[in-house]
Amino acid sequence: MNPTFLIAKKRDGGELADGEIADLVRGFVAGEVADYQMSAFAMAVCCRGMTVAETASLTRHMLHSGVTLDWPGSLQPEVDKHSTGGIGDKVSLPLAAMLACCDLRVPMISGRGLGATGGTLDKLESIAGFRTDLSLDEMREVVDRVGCVINGATAELVPADRRLYALRDVTATVESIPLITASIMSKKLAEGLDALVLDVKHGSGAFMKTLWDAQELARSLVDTGKQMGVATVALVTDMNQPLGCMAGNAVEVDESVASLEGNGPADLMDVTLALGAELLVMTGKAADLAAATTTLQSTIDDGSALAKFREMVVAQGGDLDAPRPVAPPQEVVSPSEGYVTAIDTQMLGRAIIELGGGRRQQGDVLDLSVGLEMLVRLGDRIEVGQPLAHLFARADQAPQAMEMVTAAIQLGRQAAAAPRLIVERVE
Ligand code: URA
């Protein structure tokens, strides 16, 4: 294999064969393809794109660059959910437990905060003692015993993605639908799944800013999942305002527990139930989405999902009853009146980073006690002096973040229609 020929073939718009992609990925992981060559290849893909077959091939060879989980003898389907991320998106926490109560097994591998969006692992680490660094054997044991686990990726899983993502991050090659698809799907499919549901977000707080881009990514993810023999559905959902009220780390765990107690905000519950219902239908656990939603809701109503979440927390070394420090609330009030016409949701995420709740650079230690509670939503009428949000922060930390929150919430004279939460279903 000569990597230069393969880079040139893609640069000139050619379609790479499965064997060529296999050679490239194997050579990259073995150190025979240099980082600069793989970066050039990533740029060629950015400019020329990939066919569905090429994307599936890249996904497959990245997936097999490391070990994968398998579940010999498992009597129930393994399933998972992946979200492209957004502010206040805490769906994984209640959903993993709810699914495990429906005879599904959830070996969820999650990530840390990326850009302005929070990370599931960071949130869970606000629970005293909670371990997100289980070995693969420990993960398997928790899934067998409890039915769900939420853990970080281990070094043996998908090394090709870890190395390629680091190059893409610094060579302006993150924004490519085939590369994003292969990155996400190789990691998810390494969990050894029977079914996967994807939450592809669009809007001011999402990775994909436009609906069109989100739809394109959803299509690519679903096509790739199916090519790889895994039942896959995506929902395209709105991220033009935070999901639920809380954004941060400890405060999102609090809101997740409240959701499992039956007191979740309507938008968070709608998305959680809709995503979960897809998995119940794909695995034959429910006849249709309506029946699946009823089954999932019953896991909250009868307390079993909360008990399951508690069981998972204990299995991962955590104590849900230990106090989770939350910084004191500082009120952000409106300087003007009008209707909420737009929210710069990414700016809200940046305000949390400003408080220390997210990373400015790799390795930053987070303050898990800071965060934000949204008190208004798109379309609401606001009066001068009305509270818009609470910032959980020390008073001396808050002024700049307060300005960011005020600037992020745009008021206008005309009431705008609230956006549709679940915009499209892609199967
Ligand atoms: N998230 C991923 O895991 N990979 C990407 O390429 C982009 C977002």
Image (cartoon, rainbow, N blue to C red):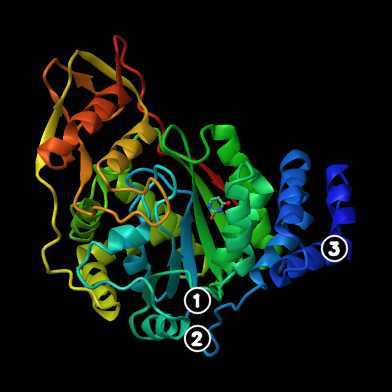
Q: Residue at x 32, y 26 (%)?
A: 408
Assess whether mark 3 and mark 1 are in contact (beta carbons under 8 angstroms): no
Circle 1 residue: 77
Residue beneath the point at 27% across and 66% down: 299
- First in sequence, mark 1 or 3: give its number: 3
Q: Residue 263, relative to residue 377: is it above or below?
A: below
Q: Earlier in the sequence, mark 2 or mark 3?
A: 3
The percent position of residue 126, horizontal first and vertical second, equals 23, 61
Q: Which label was assigned to residue 74?
A: 2
Amino acid at the residue labelled 2: Ser
Disc 1 marks a residue whose amino acid type is: Pro
Residue 221 in sight from this viewpoint: no
Query: What is the x, y in percent for residue 151?
Result: 40, 70
Quarter residue 131 falls in:
bottom left
Quarter residue 163 falls in: bottom right
Q: Which residue is mark 3?
A: 20
**Alpha-carbon span between mark 1 and mark 3:** 33 Å
Q: Secondary structure at mark 2?
A: loop
